[in-house]
Image (cartoon, rainbow, N blue to C red):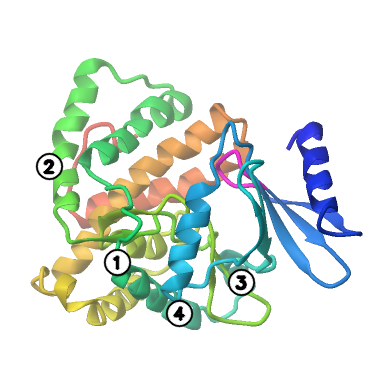
């Protein structure tokens, strides 16, 4: 937030509170910034989304929709969509990731996250969420070619190499797109799930990019998290738990659990290819070099998926 933007925020807050303190919170991978607002009565989170760069309307609309279907998202206390300011319920500082780092038992978190995910998938698409199709998946995977390979490995793929990459990847993307479709959070992982001070259910954040996409997508994001490395036995356990309780209209499309779990891993592969490109872009275009630290584990996941699926994709073993 620039000094001018900060002053605008203080003036806006001053219309609602006679006294408050404002403290920086960590930002995310967008132009949005977050601040903790402390008053005598309560703490809040201020979302600053500069209107010329970020539109808060999707956050507001999707948040209201999720709350209607019993997902725990932050309540909007005060909103000014024109200026790009939202004052939100404060879930605290403990993400799933932080909670896990403190060696707490995370089984209850998985149970709750999967229950909320089932509710999300059961929600009717009254918002007409956009479709997460093969064109978008391909565009996301191209971030690997355009950012990860040149900036991390010093390799700029030539047209023939790009074509070979696309030729092998395209049928896989069509398989993913052919899976049953449901509402998808799109970033359902350990840094976007909060453990509030008053306990479960988990608080869900960063949901403004929700789409309609593969029923496997959010589970893949959670189990094959770019920031976590769970044992495969644990992933399979929770995948089976989720599959057992899957809505019949989705479940009947899969022959058995093994077919389901292979689809989860294939979905995860597409996501990790994308994320490698995003991390490289965040570091080298946006100056957020901390994301370089997340690349090794994401790359490791990617290689494990290729092995588990018995796949070879040109340029992907870089």
The N terminus - image quarter: top right
Choose between 51 and 43: the one closer to the eye: 51
**How far separated are the C-alphas under marks 4 and 2?**
34 Å
**How far separated are the C-alphas under marks 1 and 2?**
29 Å
Q: Nearer the viewer, mark 4 or mark 2?
A: 4
**First in sequence: mark 1 or mark 3?**
3
Q: Nearer the viewer, mark 4 or mark 3?
A: 4
Q: Nearer the viewer, mark 1 or mark 2?
A: 1
Give the magenta range.
27-33
Q: Residue at x 54, y 35 (%)?
A: 282
| Residue that mark 1 sits on | 124
| Residue that mark 4 sits on | 112
Residue 196: percent from left, percent from top: 64, 75
**How far separated are the C-alphas under marks 3 and 2?**
39 Å
Q: Is residue 25 magenta?
A: no
Choose between 124 and 95: the one closer to the eye: 124
| Residue that mark 2 sits on | 171
Q: Nearer the viewer, mark 1 or mark 3?
A: 1
The C terminus - image quarter: top left
Q: Is residue 32 magenta?
A: yes
């Amino acid at each position: 937030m620039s000094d001018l933007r900060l002053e605008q925020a203080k003036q806006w807050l001053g219309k609602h509170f006679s006294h408050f303190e404002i403290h920086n919170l960590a930002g995310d991978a967008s132009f949005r910034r977050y601040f903790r607002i402390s008053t005598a009565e309560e703490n809040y989170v201020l979302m600053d989304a500069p209107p010329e760069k970020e539109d808060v309307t999707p956050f507001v609309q999707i948040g209201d929709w999720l709350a209607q279907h019993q997902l725990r998202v932050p309540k909007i206390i005060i909103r000014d969509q024109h200026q790009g300011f939202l004052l939100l319920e404060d879930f605290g500082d403990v993400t799933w990731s932080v909670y896990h780092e403190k060696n707490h038992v995370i089984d209850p978190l998985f149970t709750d996250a999967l229950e909320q995910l089932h509710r999300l998938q059961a929600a009717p698409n009254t918002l007409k969420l956009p479709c997460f199709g093969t064109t978008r998946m391909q565009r996301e995977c191209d971030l690997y070619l355009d950012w990860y390979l040149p900036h991390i490995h010093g390799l700029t793929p030539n047209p023939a190499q790009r074509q070979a990459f696309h030729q092998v990847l395209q049928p896989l993307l069509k398989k993913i797109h052919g899976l049953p479709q449901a509402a998808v959070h799109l970033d359902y992982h350990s840094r976007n799930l909060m453990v509030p001070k008053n306990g479960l259910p988990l608080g869900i954040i960063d949901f403004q990019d929700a789409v309609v996409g593969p029923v496997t997508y959010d589970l893949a994001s959670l189990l094959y998290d770019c920031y976590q490395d769970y044992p495969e036995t644990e992933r399979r356990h929770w995948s089976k738990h989720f599959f057992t309780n899957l809505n019949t209209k989705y479940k009947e499309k899969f022959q058995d659990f093994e077919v389901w779990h292979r689809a989860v891993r294939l979905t995860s592969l597409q996501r990790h290819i994308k994320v490698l490109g995003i991390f490289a872009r965040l570091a080298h275009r946006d100056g957020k070099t901390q994301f370089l630290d997340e690349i090794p584990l994401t790359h490791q996941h990617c290689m494990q998926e290729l092995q588990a699926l018995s796949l070879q994709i040109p340029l992907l073993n870089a």
